Image: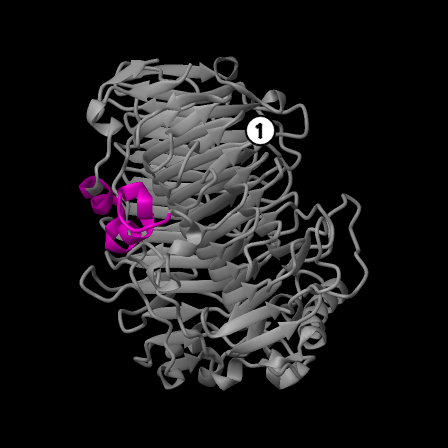
Amino acid sequence: MDQHYSDNQARTVGRRAVVKGIGIAGAAMAGTALGVGQSTSASAASPASFRFGGTGDSAPDTVVYPEAAHAATAADPGILDVKRLFGAKGDGVTDDTAALVAAYDEVIRRYRTLGSASPAANQNVIYLPNGTYLVSDSIVYSLPLETIDNGNEILARVRFQGQNRDGVVIKLADNSPGFQTGADKPLLSLAKGDRNGSVSSNSVQNLTLDTGRGNPGAIGLRFCGANNAAVRHVTIRSGDGQGSAGLSLPVLVTQGSYRHLLIEGFDYAISAERDRGFGICVEHVRIRGQRVAGIRVIDGCVSVRDLYSHNRVPAAKITGASGHLVMVDSVLVGASGAAIESDTGHLFARNVRAVGYDSAITRGGKVARDGAYVGEYASHPVSKLFEGRTTSLNLPVEDPPRQPWPTDVSTWTNVKDHGAVGDGKTDDTAAIQAAMNTGKPVVYFAPGHRYLVTGTVAIPASVERVNFMYTHVAPADSMPPETPMFSVLGSASDKPLRVEDLFGWIQGDELKPLIDHASTRTLVISDVHHQHAPIYRNSVPGGKVFLDAVSCRTGKHAPHVGVPGFIFDRQRVWIRFCNSEYGKPAIINRGSTMWMLGGKTEGAWTSFATEAGGRTEVLGAIINVYTGGHELDAATPILSTVDSEVSATLATFSDTTRFHTTVAAETRAGETRTLDYSLVPRRINEIQSFLPLYVGAKSPARFSWRKR
């Protein structure tokens, strides 16, 4: 049964309310929907007024690297400059297809021949300096498709990095052969096959993809990335509005962070198409001029915040029975029909404005919300175990602090310049500490190396950014369990610290966390994966933590049991996609306020444990019930709450007979109650589930509810 607010004031939205909700630039684009301007078509808005949202890291960076980070030859690891090393021109006239494919081939060749543990196979970035790169075919590796025994494509650690989103354009020539009607052919593709569960660390960042004119079968970007991946600060546009999809996500498995995107034209802006382990975070996205729908969710789990859609078609559409869409804090400007069509699957929406549409939400072809404002909506009944509120916690949301890329490379210091060897055997602790103590605001780890630490390295307040350049950092066997590799010092008044671009590959029984947050200094962690090591602990409470595409695996297959990947003790935490695997439990919230937009867990134990008065809000997550050989106690809850508050909407996936029969367990004042899986909707089959919305909270709701 659908749930609805009893909020009569939300049923009509005047011009003043819409302007307040979407800002002056957004209101200027709304056109006839607001009774101003002349048209609601996408073409009515000038590109200058179609702005990115969010107050955090929304402005495009200009990304440059120190010379020591660049690969000296095409055979070396590091920053692979396509102009320097592969002959790309970027002049908008020369066909650069072969040059870009050659760089891509080099990365794939290394990964296939050297393997996951090799620094040369993992620590590479395909770098595009500013320019217009004219191409006539798909940018995808030319080597034959190869798979391992389980069908996974042998592709990972593929990273395309532009110098500037507006300065780097990969442009498909107009009327290119092979991109005609029905081709569904990508301009840039991170896949040849349709399955890839390898730990990816794939990314596409800071560039524009232009499919040109006369290419009706074109896809802007076909992307995949399991466990940890990102597409950020990317514009995808069709010169004439034609094309299949701007961002196509057809590969099993796909996860990660998709933020600060502008997609113009195509049948669909974003198409999410698979079920297994598919969970993504989509935030600060602007779409317009689509021909069928803005976002199509077939079978994936998609969490959306701050979407601005300007279209004559639905802004979002769920078409598959296992599709799971969460949409919050968004503005959808249209002309007729429904802003969100939920044909099947599951939908959770909150704080969504639908301007110009006939209705906000339809469910199975029938109007579910006919007003212009959706306070909160769930397509299935809310689950709870005790008396209390029946709406989500709606925790306050903060964007990560703005930290512009440091373009003055003289402010960077290289740990190699302070004596680090990086051979995986020599103790680099003192050298890394010396780099931290220089007073330079940026410390980086030269690629092509594996760094070993035998003790904790302190990051002082003078360091504002630590860029690992996707290198391996491993703790020595001699370090006791729970001894952190790095400790964050400072105070709340110091500039925030950003820790980024780490790909740790230990493959051992390591129990040493990457970071101890030993101060109240604001900490941002982005594009970090460690295997096998937990990521976060804090010995000092009271700080702010922002995670964006952060993942870890803390345990190997049975009998090794991992520790929690993340323990937040009395912190304020905001997560944009997090993946924690094989920890018992995966994530602990101990008296913190923790907000998550999109995520994944994997293993045989509890995913989210909230205790000591913590508050946890999960807005979309995929619970991958793959146990790595461990026996799953079916009574183990996905959510465990003890004298705390939780709201969560999520979905499960299992391709075996294992599943959680207990979805949630909640304890209040010594009394424990449980939620059985039979009480929530099925997903795909009898052992997979939707959790439309679970609420365990005493605090009152902001609005009263009524059932329709």
Residue at coordinates 69% horizontally, 57% vertically from top-left?
155
> What is the x, y in percent for residue 589?
34, 38
Residue at coordinates 66% horizontally, 77% vertically from top-left?
96
Q: Quick check: 381 above or below 19?
A: above
Residue 525 appears in the rendering:
yes
Q: Quick check: 1 above or below 614?
A: above
Q: Quadrant of the C terminus?
A: top left
Q: Quadrant of residue 688?
A: top right
> What is the x, y in percent for residue 149?
80, 46
* Left or right of residue 562: residue 668: left
Indicate the amino acid at tag 1.
Answer: Ser
Q: Quick check: 138 above or below 67?
A: above
Q: Quick check: 469 above or below 644?
A: below
> What is the x, y in percent for residue 507?
62, 54
Q: Nearer the viewer, residue 577 or 216?
A: 216
Q: Which region shows up in magenta?
A: 16-39
> What is the x, y in percent for residue 63?
44, 74
Q: Residues within 10 Å of mark 1 (few under 14, many from 20)?
A: many
Residue 583 appears in the rendering:
no
Q: Which residue is mark 1?
A: 322
